[in-house]
Image (tube, rainbow, N blue to C red):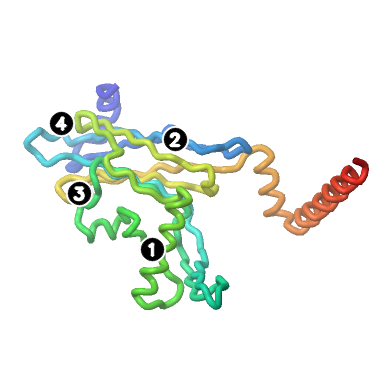
């Protein structure tokens, strides 16, 4: 299989001075139905080197970093405080561009691969996410809210890091698995693959993943989006009907 890949893509290597990534994913489309409990996404591919020769054992090792992101969203984060024994909303912060899902898998911990500046440029790690706060905040306040946001998403399974999760075979083929939780939002996701060697990012490639609702769930979501007033009236009518039916059955028995 490796020989076939190299033969088919040999024209891409002519005149190339840097490695080329050829990534793919096991599922380009993920449908969410009522029984959806999550999915395991397999990300794999090949590293094509100039001249078709992989680095020798005496050269710096080749590493792979894979970042899977969900569509960005604007959110308002509120901080609760206990006042006179009652929890109330206190300070708040709005963020313009927050990834709805973020997962990073790497062949080694990213802190061992690149410096902090490179991690910030490519958003390698949860502590390097660019959340784009909408309002000016003091640095300590911004750090507190950002940490709270990341912690909430981690507990929901929407943010996570998987160091040592990428397996590389003969410095040419790689593979990794990323878990998609049941509560994943729908939209267009991106799987970005980066080739790292000697502290530098030498190549990058992106594959798109579409996560969408299917069946009855898709019909309900479309109805709520396109005809919100009729959807609301139908929901109220259905609730009244179910309540009346339950009361009638209860009185009979």
Residue 77 placement (x, y as % from top left): 50, 67
Instruction: Give the distance between the C-alpha atoms of the residues marked 2 and 3, in whole angstroms.
Output: 26 Å
Instruction: Nearest to the eye among marks 3 and 1: give it.
Output: 1
Mark closer to the chain start, 3 or 1: 3
Q: Earlier in the sequence, mark 4 or mark 2?
A: 2
Q: Position of residue 102 (x, y in %)?
A: 41, 50
Q: CA distance from mark 3 to mark 1?
A: 24 Å
Kindly indicate the quadrant of the structure image that contains residue 9: top left
Q: Are marks 4 and 2 in contact (CB under 8 Å)?
A: no
Residue 40: mark: 2
Say which residue appears at 51% left-offset and 75% top-offset.
Answer: 90
Q: Mark 2 or mark 1: which comes first in sequence?
A: 2
* Contact check, label 2 and label 1, Cβ < 8 Å: no
Judge the density around disc 1: few (<14), some (14-19), many (≥20) Cα neighbours within 10 Å.
few
Looking at the image, tell me whether mark 3 or mark 4 is earlier in sequence order. Answer: 4
Front residue (pair 244, 124):
244
Q: Mark 3 sits on what residue?
A: 113
Specify whether 212 is left or right of 91. Answer: right
Label 1, on which residue? 147
- Near mark 4 (Cα within 10 A), the count class, few <14, some 14-19 or many ≥20, is few
Residue 18's x, y, as percent? 19, 43
Q: Please give the name of the residue rendered at 10% of the width and 33% of the height, measured from the top-left corner.
A: 56
């Amino acid at each position: 299989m490796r020989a076939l890949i190299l033969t088919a893509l040999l024209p891409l290597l002519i005149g190339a001075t840097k490695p080329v990534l050829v990534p793919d994913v096991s599922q380009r489309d993920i449908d969410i139905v009522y029984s959806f409990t999550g999915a395991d996404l397999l990300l794999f591919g090949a590293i094509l080197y100039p001249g078709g020769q992989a680095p020798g054992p005496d050269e710096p090792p080749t590493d792979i970093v894979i970042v899977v992101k969900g569509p960005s969203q604007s959110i308002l984060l509120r901080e609760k405080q206990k006042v006179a024994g009652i929890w109330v909303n206190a300070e708040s912060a709005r963020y313009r561009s927050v990834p709805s899902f973020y997962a990073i898998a790497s062949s080694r911990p990213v802190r061992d691969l690149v410096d902090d500046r490179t991690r910030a440029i490519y958003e390698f790690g949860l502590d390097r996410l660019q959340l784009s706060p909408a309002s000016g905040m003091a640095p300590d306040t911004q750090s507190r809210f950002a940490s709270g946001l990341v912690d909430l998403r981690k507990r929901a399974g929407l943010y996570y890091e998987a160091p040592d999760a990428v397996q590389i075979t003969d410095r040419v083929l790689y593979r990794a698995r990323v878990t998609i939780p049941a509560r994943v939002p729908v939209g267009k996701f991106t799987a970005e693959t980066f080739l790292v060697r000697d502290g530098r990012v030498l190549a990058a490639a992106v594959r798109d993943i579409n996560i969408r609702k299917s069946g009855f769930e898709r019909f309900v979501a479309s109805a709520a989006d396109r005809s919100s007033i009729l959807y609301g009236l139908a929901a109220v009518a259905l609730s009244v009907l179910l309540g009346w039916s339950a009361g009638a059955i209860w009185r009979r028995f």
